[in-house]
Amino acid sequence: MRMKIPTIGLFLMALASCVTGTDEKYGNAVNQQKPLVETVLTEDEQKRLTPDVIIESLKAGNKRFVNGSLTLRDHSAQVRHAVLGQYPKAVVLACIDSRVTVEDIFDKGIGDLFIAKVAGNVVNEDILGSMEYACKVAGAKVVIVLGHEYCGAVKSAIDEVKIGNITNLLARMKPAIDSVSPDSKNRTSKNKEFVHSVCLENVHLAIVTIREKSLLLNEMELAGQIKIVGADYDMETGIVTFLEQH
């Protein structure tokens, strides 16, 4: 006598067939069941990379992010594989904003990137020291200052917010504010174009600060060992635009 399969059982079987099927519509779902365990970058592999190759790989990763085709990784396994050493490709200075998830934005995994986060992606001595460690000691070959649209820190700086230690942090963005359209009347955080321009200028001036205040990184860049670049992340589209060098 054959047993009857409960209705809920039929539903679960149908659902499973959809998830593991080969239909193109559900192609990504197959990978979701088995995250990839990528090999962590080795020292030899890192040495063979050039700054330009790394930047192109970051651009390609961002395209996957925009298209919704992120690489599925087993981060737990990757961490265990990287216990004895790390050889990241780049160091990224980004905003503390919770929406700026750098590894996802560039579709990178454990051991790929050093990431420093601070409100408004501003530069200070500790950030510079961290970048110097990433490049001179650990071998990273690209320094990226990543600004982003709708940055609350930039808006607060424009509005001259003064609260505790936030006051001094926001003051670091004043040069960017002052240099953008000084004759404009609509210099407020409600002016999207003005905020956008300040965000870009803030990235540019951060790069200037890195070169001026880190003799080590400046020398490495002049020698062609690293590149220091700026980028802007649009949260609405997911697109990262690498900025032209000034």
Image: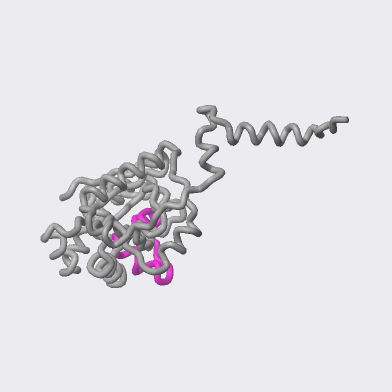
Residue 20 location, x and y as percent?
Answer: 58, 35
Instruction: Inspect the magenta stretch and tell me whether residue 139 lies in it.
Output: no
Mark yes or no: residue 194 visible: no
Which of 166 and 134 lies nearest the eye of the viewer? 134
Please say if 12 is above or below 198: above
Count numbered badges in the picture: 0
Which of 192 and 204 lies nearest the eye of the viewer? 204
Please say if 39 is above or below 5: below
104 vs 213, left or right, is: right
Look at 31% across and 65% down and name the residue there. Answer: 171
Residue 41 location, x and y as percent?
Answer: 34, 57
Q: Which residues are magenta?
A: 152-173
Q: How is the image coloured?
A: one colour
Q: Quadrant of residue 153?
A: bottom left
Which of 137 and 82 lies nearest the eye of the viewer? 82
Residue 231 location, x and y as percent?
Answer: 28, 49
Farthest residue, direction front: 1
